[in-house]
């Protein structure tokens, strides 16, 4: 698998992958995450502009995408019901998704991020059981609850090497 920065020409494929993911999440008991067309093309374009968006490729086909930022995530400044594992500089993974037909891609993307930054934080919706299982399988530790800007809660995880 290859991982590279997302190109603007990749946007139609990313929108298709996120559409597939929204349906998968709704079908697996998580109908309230990534609703109303989230993530928007404007958000994805901003991620590309900032150099935070990546795609994973197998056999010349994009099979996944994610946002990876090395730096402070403002919504992570307050955590309830627990604590972050440390206060060291960290990386953040957002909006990770893959095509439904490719299993294990999310784990490979998380491994790639860990090679770039040995201290990763990530959050997910309480109803996103497949993502929670992926995180736990990959050694991420539950740390508590964070709130997004819109007030919605997410469960937070961290992994440190």
Image: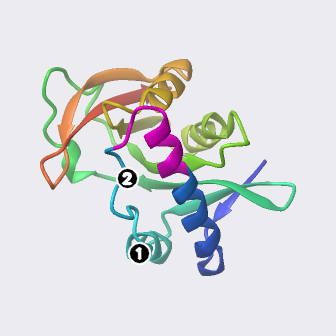
Asked whether 37 falls inside the magenta stretch, the response is no
For mark 2, what is the residue?
34
Report the magenta stretch's main SS.
helix
Q: What label sits on residue 150 in the rendered view? A: none
Asked whether 27 falls inside the magenta stretch, the response is yes
In the image, residue 102 sits, relative to residue 17, either above or below, namely above
Q: Which residues are magenta?
A: 21-31
Viewer-proximal residue among 84 and 122: 122
The residue at 44%/74% (across/down) is: 41
Instruction: Give the image location of residue 52, x and y in percent.
Output: 48, 63
The residue at 39%/64% (across/down) is: 37
Distance between the alpha carbons at the discs numbered 1 and 2:
17 Å
In the image, residue 143 sits, relative to residue 67, either above or below, namely above
Instruction: Give the image location of residue 122, x and y in percent.
Output: 38, 39
Q: Residue furthest front?
A: 27
User: Where, by quadrant of the figure, is residue 159 drawn?
Assistant: top left
Q: Is residue 112 found left or right of 89 in the rendered image?
A: right
For mark 1, what is the residue?
46
């Amino acid at each position: 698998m290859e991982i590279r920065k997302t190109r603007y020409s990749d946007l139609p494929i990313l929108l298709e992958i996120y559409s597939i993911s929204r349906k998968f999440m709704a079908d697996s008991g998580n109908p309230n995450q990534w609703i109303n067309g989230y993530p928007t093309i404007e958000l994805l374009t901003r991620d590309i502009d900032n150099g935070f968006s990546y795609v994973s490729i197998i056999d010349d086909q994009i099979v996944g995408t994610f946002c990876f930022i090395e730096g402070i995530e403002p919504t992570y400044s307050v955590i309830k019901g627990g604590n972050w594992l440390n206060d060291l500089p960290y990386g953040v993974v957002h909006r990770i998704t893959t095509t439904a037909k490719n299993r294990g891609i999310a784990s490979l993307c998380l491994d790639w991020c860990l090679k770039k930054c040995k201290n990763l934080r990530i959050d997910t919706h309480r109803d996103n059981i497949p993502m929670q299982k992926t995180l736990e399988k990959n050694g991420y530790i539950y740390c508590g609850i964070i709130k997004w800007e819109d007030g919605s809660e997410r469960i937070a995880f961290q992994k440190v090497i």
